[in-house]
Image (cartoon, rainbow, N blue to C red):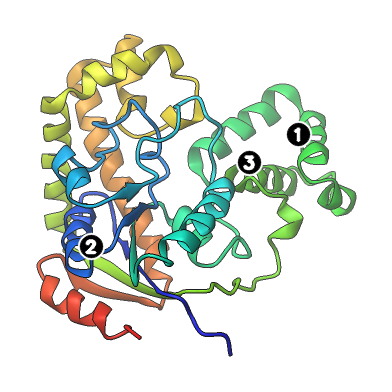
Amino acid sequence: MTSKKGTLVVVVGPTGSGKTDVAVELAKHLRAPILSTDSRQVFRGMAVGTAQPSAEQLAAVPHYFIADREVSDDYNAGRFEAEALVLLDRLFGEHDYVLAVGGSGLYVDALCRGFDALPPTDPALRGRLEARLRDEGLGTLLEELRRLDPIYYESVDRDNPARVVRAVEVCLQTGRPYSEQRSGESRERPFRIVKIGIETPREELYERIDCRVDGMLEAGLEEEARRLYPLRGLNALMTVGYREMFEYFDGKIPYEEAVRLIKRNSRRYAKRQMTWFRRDADIAWMKRDEIKKMKIFCESFAD
């Protein structure tokens, strides 16, 4: 059996659970850099709306995949997996531990398992594809599927719109052909993987989310969204916080309703995140103030 080189400590949990604070504390203790697994924090110009780490946190611990892509970049989990694995190969030559922190389940799975496990439906992307199906017809989506995955195109039931939409959706979500992702087997990684989930009671989590949104507004979320408004059609901005602000700018809803919807949709997103992470039996769930317990847990995997 090939020996593993280093330990990747993966910190997950829903939005507002305190993952960033926990990860920075663990990283300082383990003398480890942090790799973000947040699909939106990777973009520049979205610091407030995506709750990127503070300047103090960034200065305290080296971070990767934070604000290092333009918002117009067509970035996806497939590219993230490839780039992160190259980066980890280098980092494990310098560190015994590396932390990965974020709430994007698809990016976490890409890093830890590869894409043999198909991602769940992305509601925003599914809505756009269904609108195209309605407005342009099945033939347009079949042509896109033939371009994205010619192998699956040959075998798909071309009279079944649901299967065509799903295949195109997976290709666009992951950046890889659908036909390559159906083996159901995880890919072997050359490093150990330890997963910690930040457990927070629901009522407390929802209260934290509401306070977090208020903090974002005070920190300039509206102003940030106005700067990004000309780019509102980009996939990176189809995100809670910006989407509701754009509707407010368009005059579709008042400001107070935009704030209410940001809070509501953030809570709904947190619920979907927990549904995703609860399916992973490898996650050890701990409260965010159990830092000492987390440190002991991580160190138990040392060589």
Up-down relation of residue 134 to residue 95 (above or below): above
Residue at mark 2: 27
Amino acid type of the residue tagged 1 in the rendering: Leu
Which image quarter: residue 142?
top right
Where disc 3 sits, the SS reads: helix
Counting from the top left corner in percent of width and height, residue 209 is at 18, 45
Where disc 2 sits, the SS reads: helix
Q: Residue at x 48, y 80 (%)?
A: 4
Residue at mark 1: 141
Label whose residue precedes the other's in the sequence (2 or 1):
2
Counting from the top left corner in percent of width and height, residue 159 is at 84, 44
What distance separates the C-alpha of mark 3 from that of mark 2?
A: 33 Å
Screen quadrant of the N terminus: bottom right
Label 1: few (<14), some or many (≥20) within 10 Å?
Answer: many
Counting from the top left corner in percent of width and height, residue 208 is at 13, 48
Q: Residue at x 67, y 27 (%)?
A: 132
Q: Residue at x 34, y 34 (%)?
A: 240
Screen quadrant of the C terminus: bottom left
Is 155 placed left or right of 170 in the picture? Answer: right
Amino acid type of the residue tagged 2 in the rendering: Ala
Q: How many marks?
A: 3
Label whose residue precedes the other's in the sequence (3 or 2):
2
Is 33 placed left or right of 191 in the picture? Answer: left
Residue at mark 3: 172
Q: Are marks 2 and 1 in contact (CB under 8 Å)?
A: no
- Please identify the residue farthest to the right as the structure is shown: 154
What distance separates the C-alpha of mark 2 from that of mark 1?
A: 45 Å
Amino acid type of the residue tagged 3 in the rendering: Leu
Residue 157 seen in the current view:
yes
Counting from the top left corner in percent of width and height, residue 146 is at 83, 40
- Please identify the residue farthest to the front as the structure is shown: 94
Nearer mark to the viewer, of 3 and 2: 2
